[in-house]
């Protein structure tokens, strides 16, 4: 099939994702077609522990990945020889899981004599909106909100990211998950909290908006999480009111920090959101209004592309090959990386538990 063609639109990439608790494989073409994809969530394995257990995650990836690669190739009616390159997440993430996916990608690339593209998982999220929206050009202002990250990035091209803000403590997805745990909603928490907000009053519980109005550009969610805990323990508030008030406080922080980034940087034609928290309808709605106010285009990937998936990893591989058509592949001894910031030049920020 496409292996003999040079046109980047005709390239076929097999992507592998295993950085957290989703095992995922996808085949995507350079013309933005998701030919086949499968995702296996490990929610059931981790639920008894209230969060992702790294060893359990790595073992589950190891058990599922090889049969899933075969199944996705079968779904696409292809053999591994038909793809033009193998793209695998090489970090950042839980190192055991990343190693399972990256080693599988290396083995496939070696066996089929195809280039290996080692993809930064965050770059997968950052470029995923372009898989869904072919009109979305560079630059764009990206809010990346997931279980491990909360960043504002200026996306200036493939491989060109400038971090404008990050969290000094917790990621927003983490804050949703912890709120869910406090309220007894189980794991994973984000969707359950969102569900409960529908019966609650977002003004009922006074909660802080950490760093709102601050001169520094960053986010902080640890204090909000503690305030949620105190509100719950006071016994004075209904869980739905706490959930709704928490979500509103988090959204107010997002809008405040994004407004600051918009004020202090040259204009961006588009505002884009990516990462698991981008699945939240109220977050999307608030960002869409912000984009409207600034007459910017607003793009949010479909829900299935927001949470971890392999189509975004394959797509990042497509973008890399489109930019560098003669790319021969990353070296097969490339290492899995638990940390891998998108903007290596970004200054470290104060605070403990900085994610990237
Ligand atoms: P990721 O790290 O990109 O896989 O995203 C997972 C994170 O997104 C977890 O922390 C989830 O709780 C969070 N998440 C997923 N769906 C929602 C939602 N509807 N509202 C808020 N957070 C969500
Ligand atoms: Mg992710």
Image: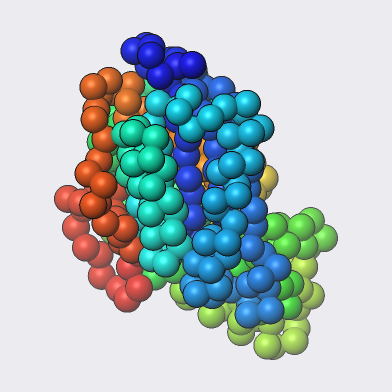
Q: Residue at x 73, y 78 (%)?
A: 184
Asked whether residue 305 is in view, the answer is no
Q: Nearer the viewer, residue 86 or 236?
A: 86
Instruction: State the count of labels.
Output: 0
Residue 113 occupies quadrant = top left
Name of the residue lying farthest toward the front: 111
In the picture shown, does residue 61 fall above or below 39?
below
Compared across the picture, whether 177 is left or right of 20 comes to right
**Residue 264: x, y in percent?**
28, 41
Quarter placement of the C terminus: bottom left
| Front residue of this view, candidates 214 and 169 | 169
Q: Give x and y (percent) for residue 279.
A: 62, 47
**Residue 182 located left or right of residue 159:** right
Residue located at (35% from left, 32% from top): 114
Using residue 324 as the reference point, say whether residue 83 is left or right of it: right
- Left of 92 or right of it: where is 230? right
Tell me which residue sits at (26%, 35%) in the image. 329
Can you say whether 3 is above or below 232 in the image?
above
Residue shown at 40%/26% (left/top)? 84
Q: Residue furthest bottom?
A: 234
Image height of 265 relative to 5, above or below: below
Residue 309, position as x, y percentages in the image: 55, 45
């Amino acid at each position: 099939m496409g292996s003999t063609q040079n046109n980047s639109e005709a390239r076929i990439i097999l992507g592998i994702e295993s950085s957290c608790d989703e095992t995922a494989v996808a085949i995507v073409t350079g013309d933005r077609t998701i030919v086949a994809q499968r995702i296996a969530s490990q929610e059931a394995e981790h639920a008894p522990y209230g969060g992702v257990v790294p060893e359990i995650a790595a073992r589950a990836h190891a058990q599922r990945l090889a049969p899933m690669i075969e199944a996705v190739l079968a779904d696409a009616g292809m053999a591994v020889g038909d793809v033009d390159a193998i793209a695998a997440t090489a970090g950042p993430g839980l190192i055991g899981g990343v190693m399972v996916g990256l080693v599988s990608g290396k083995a496939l690339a070696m066996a089929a004599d195809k280039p290996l593209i080692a993809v930064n998982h965050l770059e997968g999220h950052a470029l995923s909106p372009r898989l869904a929206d072919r009109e979305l050009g560079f630059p764009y202002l990206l809010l990346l909100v997931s279980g491990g990250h909360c960043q504002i990035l200026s996306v200036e091209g493939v491989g060109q990211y400038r971090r404008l803000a990050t969290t000094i403590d917790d990621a927003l997805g983490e804050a949703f998950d912890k709120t869910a745990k406090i309220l007894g909603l189980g794991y994973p928490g984000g969707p359950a909290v969102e569900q409960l907000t529908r019966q609650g009053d977002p003004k009922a519980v006074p909660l802080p908006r950490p760093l709102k109005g601050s001169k520094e550009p960053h986010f902080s969610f640890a204090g909000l999480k503690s305030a949620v805990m105190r509100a719950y323990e006071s016994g004075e508030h209904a869980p739905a009111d706490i959930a709704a008030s928490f979500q509103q406080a988090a959204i107010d922080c997002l809008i405040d920090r994004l407004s600051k980034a918009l004020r202090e940087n040259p204009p961006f034609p588009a505002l884009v959101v990516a990462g698991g928290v981008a699945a939240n309808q109220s977050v999307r709605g608030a960002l869409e209004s912000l984009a409207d106010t600034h007459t910017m285009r607003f793009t949010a990937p479909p829900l299935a592309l927001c949470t971890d998936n392999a189509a975004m990893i394959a797509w990042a591989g497509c973008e890399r090959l489109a930019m560098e058509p003669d790319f021969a592949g990353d070296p097969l001894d490339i290492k899995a990386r638990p940390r891998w910031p998108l903007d290596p030049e970004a200054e470290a920020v104060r605070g403990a538990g900085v994610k990237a």
